[in-house]
Amino acid sequence: QVQLVESGGGLVQAGGSLRLSCTGSGLTISSYAMGWFRQAPGKEREFVASIRGITYYADSVKGRFTISRDNAKNTVYLQMNSLKPEDTAVYYCAANWGLASRLDNQYDYWGQGTQVTVSS
């Protein structure tokens, strides 16, 4: 059974940092494109970052967020710096057998999400 489990969310003040982790079981993360998405209350889920060899970022997070992976730990990370209140959302990681994509419908497996709240 494939599982992706996110952790590392929480409450942080604007300007602060958090590092999200997503650990896989039942799949080898290094064989997949991995993505991070987020969904704020009342809004659609949106792309944040993805990695498969090269990395892609949403314009809203470029220069502040960094996606990386540790294949030995079967884990993908999202380092979030200079957080803003508009970054508040539930963050999801996802795995895509194909290419790294900004489209959530391209992803095969999803985690349960972790809440990130940024106070002003």
Image: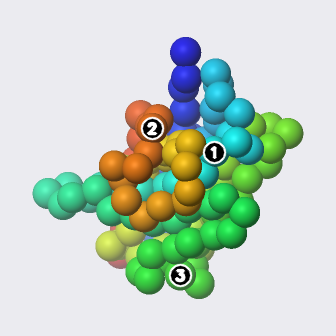
Q: Is residue 78 above or below residue 59?
A: above
The answer to whether any part of residue 99 appears in the image is yes
* Quarter-of-image position of residue 99: bottom right
Q: How is the image coloured?
A: rainbow
Question: Residue 114's x, y, as percent?
Answer: 44, 43
Q: Secondary structure at mark 3?
A: loop
The answer to whether any part of residue 114 appears in the image is no
Q: Residue furthest front?
A: 98
Q: In whole angstroms, how far apart are the C-alphas of marks 2 and 1?
A: 10 Å
Q: Is 120 displayed left or right of 73 in the figure?
A: left
For the C terminus, give its image quadrant.
Answer: bottom left
- At horizontal 60% and vertical 51% (from top left) the residue drawn is 33
Residue at image mark 2: 108
Residue at image mark 1: 32
Q: Is 7 displayed left or right of 111 in the figure?
A: right
Q: Secondary structure at mark 1?
A: loop
Q: What's the residue type where badge 2 is placed?
A: Asp
Q: Is residue 89 above or below residue 4?
A: below
Q: What's the residue type where badge 3 is placed?
A: Lys
Q: Residue furthest right?
A: 72
Q: Residue furthest left?
A: 42
Q: Earlier in the sequence, mark 1 or mark 3?
A: 1
Could you say which disc has been placed on residue 62 in the image?
3
Q: Is residue 116 above or below residue 4?
A: below
Q: Earlier in the sequence, mark 2 or mark 3?
A: 3
Crowding at mark 3 (Cα within 10 Å: few <14, some 14-19, many 20+): few
Tell me whether circle 2 and circle 1 mark residues in contact (CB < 8 Å): yes
Q: What's the residue type where badge 1 is placed?
A: Tyr
Query: Nearer the observer, disc 2 or disc 3?
Result: 2
Judging depth in this view, the residue of 117 and 28 nearest the camera is 28
